[in-house]
Amino acid sequence: KEVIMKTGVFGGTFNPVHKGHIMLAEYCMNSVGLDRIIMIPTAVPPHKRNRMITDSEHRFNMTKLAIGYNDRFEVSDMELKMDGASYTARTLSILYEENPNLCFILGADSYMALDTWFHPEIIMAKAQIACACRDGIPTAALECKAGEYCTKYGAVTHFLSMPDTDISSTMLRQMISEGKDVKQYIPEQVMEYIRTNNLYT
């Protein structure tokens, strides 16, 4: 009988991908007991439609470079190939067909708003949720939300009390545009790619 691997699904704009993203993915892998993680750069995040997003090919390439050292990580361009906005419900439904043992990874701020996303009932039916407890949101508020999601959607939530990295892609884009040193935040190969392709300047 085929063993179904427990797969973490980690979507994001990854503009640029940074060490905080990788740390969250690794922490989740160890604490939830995942066999592998698929990082999925989003094409057109519905909540960022009006912002300037770096070309998807660059974001995909940077993510690939960031995880190159770890054979339990992979990067998928499935959302980049889809027509229209990237909806998590749609992505998880496709992945679920191949692997019904999914865990969707997200931050606390996104978790609190998950019931406002496109078809939250599909998201929570297709995957368990791993929520990184950060962004200054009290544990009690997260637990209250988890109870609500469990009652309404049958959701299973794992909370990750990981150290707060305090890094954001927005902050890094700003720092790079100002010529500041960001090598402590961004993997070396990714930094090299940013310089070569003259991104964020």
Image: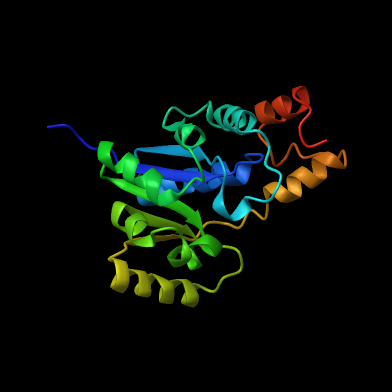
Position of 88 relative to 14 (above/below): below
Q: Position of residue 187 (x, y in %)?
A: 65, 33
> As drawn, which residue projects farthest toward the front?
84
Is 62 above or below relative to 32?
A: above
Q: Residue furthest right?
A: 178
Q: Position of residue 17 (x, y in %)?
A: 62, 39
Q: Name the residue: 62% across, 52% down.
A: 48
The single residue placed furthest to the left in the displayed view is 1
- What is the tally of numbered marks visible in this picture? 0
Q: Position of residue 24 (x, y in %)?
A: 52, 48
- Which residue appears at 38% of the width and 56% of the height? 129
Q: Quadrant of the C terminus?
A: top right
Compared to residue 17, the image places residue 150 above or below, namely below
User: Where residue 34 sits: x, y (%)?
Assistant: 35, 43
Along the line of sight, which residue is nearer the eye, 94 or 171? 94
Residue that appears at 33% across and 56% down: 122
Asked whether 51 or 11 is in front, the reply is 51
Residue 14 in the figure: left or right of residue 171:
left
Residue 135 versus residue 26: which sits nearer the camera?
A: 135
Q: Quadrant of residue 66?
A: top right
- Res. 16 image quadrant: top right
- Does residue 25 appear in this view? yes
| On-image quarter of the N terminus | top left
Left or right of residue 138, residue 76 in this image: left
Residue 76 is at least partly visible in this image:
no
Image position of 67 (left or right of 127): right
- Image quadrant assignment for residue 188: top right
